[in-house]
C-alpha cells in the first residue's frame, strides 16, 4: 500500500467556515482523493487550522509547521509521497512578512522534510503546491482582522516564490491557482465544490509520479 501524507493548513484540514467545523471526510479533498485513488493507497491528513510555514503565532499555539513536521514524519512513516501546501497563513498581518521571508520559511520547512531520516530512508517523493490565492473578502471579515489587503496581495504573488523554492530543492511542483478552485464566502477557505475540484487536480498530479 502506498502511503501519502498531506501536510498543510486549514484547507488541508478541511475547515468549513460556515460551521465552523470540518467538512465531512468524504467532502474534504483528502477524503475525495483517498476514494479516487482506491484501496492500494492510504491518504494521511496532516492539516491544521492556522498552520504557518515558520512563524509562531502568539494567539494560536502549536501552529509553526517547522516545529510540527518532525512529529508527523515520525508518526506516519514509512511514507511514499508527501504533499505540502503552506504559506497562506504567513501573510497574516501580525507577522509583518514579505515574500522573501515567506519563501525562506517555506524553504526551511521543506529542508526539514527532505533531510529527515524518514524521507531519506524511504526515497519519499515530495510535491509542493502553490496555494490558492485569497480574495478581497477575507480583508473585510467583521470578526477576523488577521488578514488585510496586503495579505491578499502577498497571497496572489506566492506562486512564483513557491515554485522557485521547489525548483531550488529539486522537488515536484504544482500551482493550485490555475485549477479554478472555488472559495467560500470568506475569500480564504475552499467551498465544498472547491474541495472537489482540488481533489480532481491533485489526483492527476500524484498519478504522474507514483
Image (cartoon, rainbow, N blue to C red):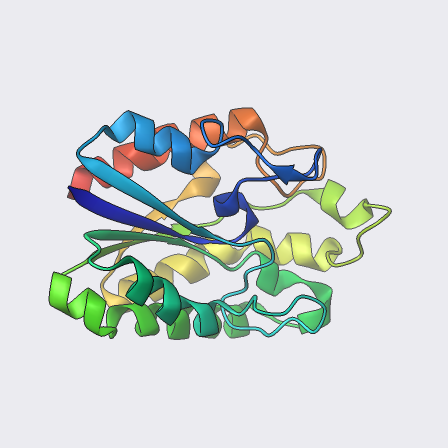
Q: Position of residue 26 (x, y in %)?
A: 45, 27
User: Does residue 190 sit above or below 119 in this rendering?
Assistant: above
Residue at 13% in and 61% down: 123
Corner quadrant of residue 73: bottom left
In front: 1, or 37?
1
The reply to whether residue 166 is in sight is yes
The reply to whether residue 132 is in sight is no
Q: Position of residue 35 (x, y in %)?
A: 32, 27
Residue at 53% in and 30% down: 24
Q: Position of residue 100 (x, y in %)?
A: 51, 73
In front: 96, or 58?
58
Corner quadrant of residue 17: top right
Q: Can you name the residue that lies furthest to the right here?
A: 142
Q: Is residue 195 left or right of residue 123?
A: right
User: Does residue 186 sit above or below 124 in this rendering?
Assistant: above
**Viewport quadrant of the N terminus:** top left
How many numbered markers are drawn? 0
Residue at 45% in and 72% down: 66
Q: Position of residue 11 (x, y in %)?
A: 53, 44
Residue at 70% in and 35% down: 19
User: Does residue 113 sit above or below 8 in this rendering?
Assistant: below
Amino acid at each position: 500500500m502506498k502511503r501519502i501524507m498531506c501536510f498543510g493548513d486549514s484547507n488541508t484540514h478541511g475547515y468549513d467556515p460556515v460551521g465552523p467545523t470540518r467538512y465531512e471526510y468524504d467532502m474534504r479533498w483528502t477524503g475525495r482523493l483517498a476514494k479516487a485513488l482506491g484501496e492500494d493507497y492510504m491518504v494521511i491528513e496532516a492539516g491544521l487550522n492556522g498552520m504557518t510555514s515558520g512563524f509562531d503565532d502568539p494567539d494560536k499555539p502549536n501552529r509553526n509547521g517547522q516545529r510540527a513536521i518532525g512529529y508527523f514524519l515520525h508518526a506516519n512513516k514509512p511514507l511514499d509521497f508527501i504533499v505540502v501546501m503552506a504559506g497562506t497563513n504567513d501573510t497574516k498581518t501580525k507577522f509583518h512578512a514579505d515574500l522573501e521571508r515567506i519563501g525562506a520559511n517555506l524553504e526551511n520547512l521543506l529542508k526539514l522534510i527532505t533531510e529527515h531520516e524518514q524521507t531519506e530512508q524511504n526515497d519519499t517523493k515530495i510535491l509542493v503546491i502553490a496555494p490558492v490565492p485569497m480574495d478581497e473578502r477575507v480583508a473585510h471579515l467583521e470578526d477576523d482582522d488577521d488578514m488585510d489587503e496586503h495579505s491578499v496581495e502577498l497571497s496572489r504573488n506566492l506562486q512564483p516564490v513557491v515554485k522557485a523554492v521547489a525548483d531550488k530543492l529539486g522537488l515536484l511542483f504544482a500551482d493550485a491557482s490555475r485549477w479554478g478552485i472555488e472559495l467560500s464566502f470568506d475569500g480564504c477557505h475552499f467551498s465544498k465544490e472547491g474541495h472537489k475540484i482540488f481533489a480532481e487536480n491533485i489526483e492527476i498530479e500524484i498519478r504522474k509520479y507514483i
